[in-house]
Amino acid sequence: MRKFKTFTCMILMCLMILALAACGMNGKEESKEEKDYCKDVKENEITFYQDGSILEIAVVDMSDLNDTTDLSDYVKTQVQGYNKAAGVDKISLLQFKEEGKTYKTAIKYSDLETFNKFNGYDFKLTIYKSQDIDALSGTAATLTDAANGNTVGSAEIKNEGLMMLVFDTKYLIKVQNGKILYTAHGAEKYGDGALYNDTEDLAVVLFAFK
């Protein structure tokens, strides 16, 4: 009888330990919050990562639409359709957020080519060469130093390995683990990024990773 009681106690103790472990796991799961990629984002923005991937936060005013109930499903369908056609997951929908009549999406792209194809854009990202920006300007280009606001001629920029982004849509450009160094044409320094200001057809941003 004593052996039976001992065995029963062991079983009860094991059950208690498992129950406590389960409670602990549940507590961890409950405390794990989904990352809010769209928090405090007011402008459409894209962030460049050193591995070539891009995070886009799109902010869309849908106040003119009477029915937006299927909007989230539509975005998911478009992403899934693109990935299926590509034969590999090149796009990830990280978040769809509703704030009144404003809708925000956080989408991660594997590379700029995928971002362009999915959105119908023609953004160009190359290693900086003064002759390339001069060709856009039709003359020796002048850029603005993002650190101090001073102007500098294209040929004066000697930094090796600078990335030059040329784009034509209103976005706030950011760089993960890097910084905006120069802006030109329709781009200007804005906070820790560079914003397209609609004054010209094209905007140019030079940036570097740390």
Image: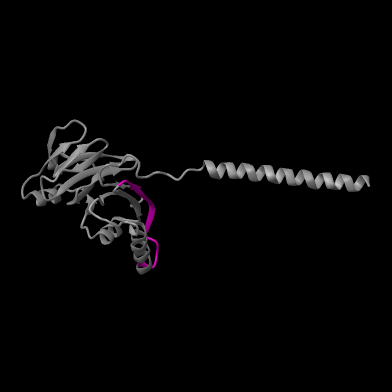
Left-right relation of 94 to 156 = right
Q: Nearer the viewer, residue 195 or 105?
A: 105
Left-right relation of 62 to 38 = left
Magenta stretch, main secondary structure class? strand
At horizontal 26% and vertical 61% (from top left) the residue drawn is 117
Q: Give how far across and how far down residue 196 sits, in percent.
A: 18, 45
Q: Give how far across and how far down residue 129 sits, in percent.
A: 18, 48
Q: Give how far across and how far down residue 24 sits, in percent.
A: 62, 41
Left-right relation of 28 to 180 = right
Q: Can I make out residue 197 in this image?
A: yes
Q: Name above or below for residue 127 compared with residue 146.
A: below
Return the residue found at the far front: 66
At horizontal 23% and vertical 47% (from top left) the residue drawn is 171
Q: Which residues are magenta?
A: 86-100
Q: Can I make out residue 49 in this image?
A: no
At horizontal 14% and vertical 47% (from top left) the residue drawn is 130
Residue 91 sits inside the magenta stretch = yes
Q: Nearer the viewer, residue 92 or 40?
A: 40
Quarter holding the C terminus is top left
Return the residue found at the far top: 148
* Picture quadrant of residue 123: bottom left
At horizontal 24% and vertical 50% (from top left) the residue drawn is 63
* Picture quadrant of residue 77: bottom left
Left-right relation of 139 to 85 = left
